[in-house]
C-alpha cells in the first residue's frame, strides 16, 4: 500500500488559488524578502524571519505563509510560495549591494563632515 | 560568484546591518549570514550542543536587530563589539541557568525596545500581538485589503519610530488620504479587534 495521500484535485486547486491570492497581496518588501530567502539555509531563513519587523511577520502570518510561534517556520503554503517565486535577480542583488554601499558612503561623509565642523568650532573658540 | 562588496567579518557584517536598518531597510541577508556564521564560530568549543548554539546566536541577533530597528543609537563602527559582548553574556547566563529566558541587557542596549505586544497596544490599548494577528487574518479573509495594508504600514512606522505614526505619514507611504487611513484604522479597531469590556 502506498503511503502517499491520494491526489485531491479540488484541494490542490484551492491551495493554488490561495497561494496566488496571497502572493498578489504581499507588499514589495515582503516579496523581496521571500525571494532572497529562497536559496538561504533553513537556519538563516529562520533568523531572517525572526529579525524581520513585526509588520512583515504579521503580513506573512495573515496570509497563511508563516507559523505564529516564535520559531518563525514557513507553513506548507509558505514553502510552496518560496518554490514558485523567482530568486532575486542578479540585477536586483547588485542594486541592493550598491544601495548598501551608497548608505555606507553617505554615513562616512556625514561622520567626516561632523568631525570637520567640530574642528572648525574648536578652532573658532 | 562572491560579491566583493559583501561583508566578511563580524565587525563589517554588524556595521553593514546597522547601516541598512538605520536607513529603514527591512533586512540585510548577507550581513545576517555572516553574523550567524561568525557568532556560531565563537561558541564552538564551549561544550554547548548545536541546538543551544543556534538558539543563543538567534536570540542575540534578534535582540540586536530589534534594538537597532527600534531606535537605539548604536554606532555602526562599534556594533561588532556590542554583539560579541552580548553573545559572551548569553553564553555565561546559559551555563549558569540553562533554559532560562535571557535577560535583556540594558547596559548594552539601553532601554528595552517595544516588543510585538507593546506595538499591538499602541494600535489599540486593549490589544495584544495575538489579537492583531487574528484581526489581520480575519480582514484578509474578508478581502479588506486596504485595511490590512494600512494597519501593516502603521505598525512598520510605529516600530521604526517607537511611537504612533500620524495618519498623514501612513497615507503618504501608501498614496492614500489621511481620512482614508483613519477610516481603515477605525474599521480595524472596531470590527477586527476585541472591544474592551464596558466599565461597570
Image: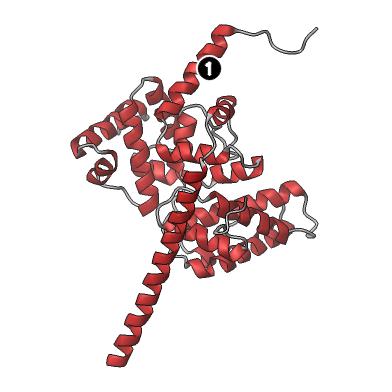
| Along the viewing direction, whichever of B143 and B48 lies nearer the viewer | B143
B3 up-or-down from B144: above or below: below
Secondary element under disc 1, as helix, strand or loop, is: helix
Q: Which residue is mark 1?
A: A15
Horizontal side of B161 relative to B130 (left or right) equals left
In the picture, residue A6 is in which quadrant? Answer: top right
Residue name at image x 40 percent, y 56 percent? B23
| Along the viewing direction, whichever of A73 and A89 lies nearer the viewer | A89
In the picture, residue A81 is in which quadrant? Answer: top right
Horizontal side of B127 relative to A41 (left or right) equals left
| Along the viewing direction, whichever of B173 and B60 lies nearer the viewer | B173
Horizontal side of A4 relative to B61 (left or right) equals right
Residue name at image x 27 percent, y 91 percent? A124
Residue B102 visible in the current orientation: no
Q: Position of residue A103 (x, y in %)?
A: 42, 60
Q: Position of residue A27 (x, y in %)?
A: 40, 35
Q: Position of residue B125 (x, y in %)?
A: 35, 41
Residue B66 visible in the current orientation: yes
In the picture, residue B127 is in which quadrant? Answer: top left
Q: Looking at the figure, which quarter contains the C terminus of chain B?
A: top left
Identify the subunit bearing mark 1.
A
Residue name at image x 34 percent, y 34 percent? B149
Q: Position of residue B68 (x, y in %)?
A: 47, 58
Amino acid at each position: 500500500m502506498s503511503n502517499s495521500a491520494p491526489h485531491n484535485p479540488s484541494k490542490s486547486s484551492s491551495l493554488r488559488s490561495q497561494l496566488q491570492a496571497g502572493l498578489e497581496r504581499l507588499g514589495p518588501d515582503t516579496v523581496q524578502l521571500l525571494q532572497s530567502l529562497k536559496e538561504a539555509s533553513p537556519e538563516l531563513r529562520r533568523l531572517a524571519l525572526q529579525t524581520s519587523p513585526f509588520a512583515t511577520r504579521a503580513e506573512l502570518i495573515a496570509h497563511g505563509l508563516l507559523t505564529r510561534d516564535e520559531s518563525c517556520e514557513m507553513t506548507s503554503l509558505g514553502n510552496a510560495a518560496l518554490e514558485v517565486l523567482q530568486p532575486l535577480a542578479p540585477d536586483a542583488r547588485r542594486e541592493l549591494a550598491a544601495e548598501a554601499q551608497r548608505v555606507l558612503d553617505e554615513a562616512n561623509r556625514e561622520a567626516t563632515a561632523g568631525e570637520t565642523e567640530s574642528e572648525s568650532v574648536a578652532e573658532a573658540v | 560568484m562572491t560579491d566583493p562588496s559583501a561583508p566578511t567579518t563580524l565587525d563589517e557584517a554588524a556595521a553593514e546591518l546597522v547601516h541598512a536598518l538605520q536607513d529603514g531597510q527591512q533586512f540585510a541577508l548577507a550581513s545576517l549570514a555572516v553574523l550567524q556564521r561568525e557568532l556560531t564560530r565563537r561558541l564552538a568549543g564551549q561544550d554547548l550542543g548545536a541546538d543551544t548554539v543556534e538558539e543563543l546566536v538567534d536570540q542575540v541577533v534578534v535582540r540586536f536587530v530589534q534594538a537597532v530597528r527600534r531606535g537605539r543609537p548604536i554606532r555602526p563602527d562599534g556594533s561588532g563589539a556590542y554583539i560579541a559582548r552580548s553573545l559572551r553574556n548569553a553564553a555565561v547566563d546559559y551555563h549558569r541557568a540553562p533554559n532560562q529566558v535571557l535577560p535583556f541587557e540594558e547596559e548594552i542596549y539601553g532601554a528595552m525596545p517595544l516588543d510585538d505586544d507593546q506595538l499591538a497596544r499602541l494600535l489599540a490599548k486593549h490589544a495584544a500581538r495575538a489579537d492583531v494577528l487574528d484581526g489581520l487574518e480575519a480582514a484578509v479573509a474578508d478581502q479588506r485589503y486596504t485595511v490590512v495594508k494600512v494597519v501593516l504600514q502603521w505598525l512598520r512606522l510605529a516600530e521604526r519610530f517607537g511611537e504612533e505614526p500620524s495618519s498623514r505619514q501612513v497615507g503618504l507611504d501608501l498614496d492614500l488620504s489621511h481620512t482614508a487611513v483613519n477610516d481603515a484604522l477605525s474599521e480595524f479597531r472596531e470590527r477586527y479587534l476585541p472591544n474592551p469590556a464596558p466599565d461597570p
